[in-house]
Image (spheres, rainbow, N blue to C red):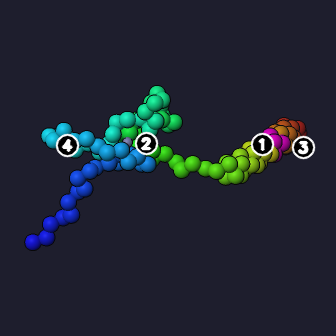
Amino acid sequence: MSTTPAQPSAQVCEFPGCDRPLTYAGTGRRPKYCNQPTDPDRPAEWPANPVHNKFNAKRLRDAPPPQDAETVHALADRIEALEQALADRDREFAQLSAQVARLRAHVDQDQESPR
Ligand SMILES: [Zn+2]
């Protein structure tokens, strides 16, 4: 008969980067989080000093990974290039629309004049 490995008796907080020991009252569900902010000497604040609980652990896991300054700079350059391309496209569209309007007026004038 096989047994699953026993949980370590000294459980620690499951919040990423926290290893505070958890106290268990002996009844009910065992706690998974210490419910303390990362820095207990400062006020709890998301995301700088989150309280270690299930909700904030999920928020942290779901948050996009931090990007380095080079990546942010490259993304900003790309956005700027896309905005410029969009502005160029808008200008071309306005020019084409004006040409179409002139051609349409010319065609309408030809159709109205007697041959
Ligand atoms: Zn913790």
Q: Earlier in the sequence, mark 1 or mark 3?
A: 1
Q: Residue at x 33, y 39 (%)?
A: 34
Label 3 secondary element = loop
Q: Is residue 50 above or below residue 7?
A: above
Magenta-colored stretch includes residue 28: no
Mark 1 CB lies closer than 8 A to ligand 1 = no
- Which label number is shown at residue 87? 1
CA distance separating discs 2 and 4: 22 Å
The reply to whether callout 3 and callout 2 are in contact (CB within 8 Å) is no
* Image quarter (top left, top right, bottom left or bottom right) of the C terminus: top right
- Towards the viewer: 95 or 82: 82
* Image quarter (top left, top right, bottom left or bottom right) of the N terminus: bottom left
At label 3, counting other C-alpha atoms closer than 10 Å, the crowd grade (few under 14, some 14-19, many 20 or more) is few
Q: Earlier in the sequence, mark 3 or mark 2?
A: 2
Magenta-colored stretch includes residue 95: yes
The reply to whether callout 4 and callout 1 are in contact (CB within 8 Å) is no
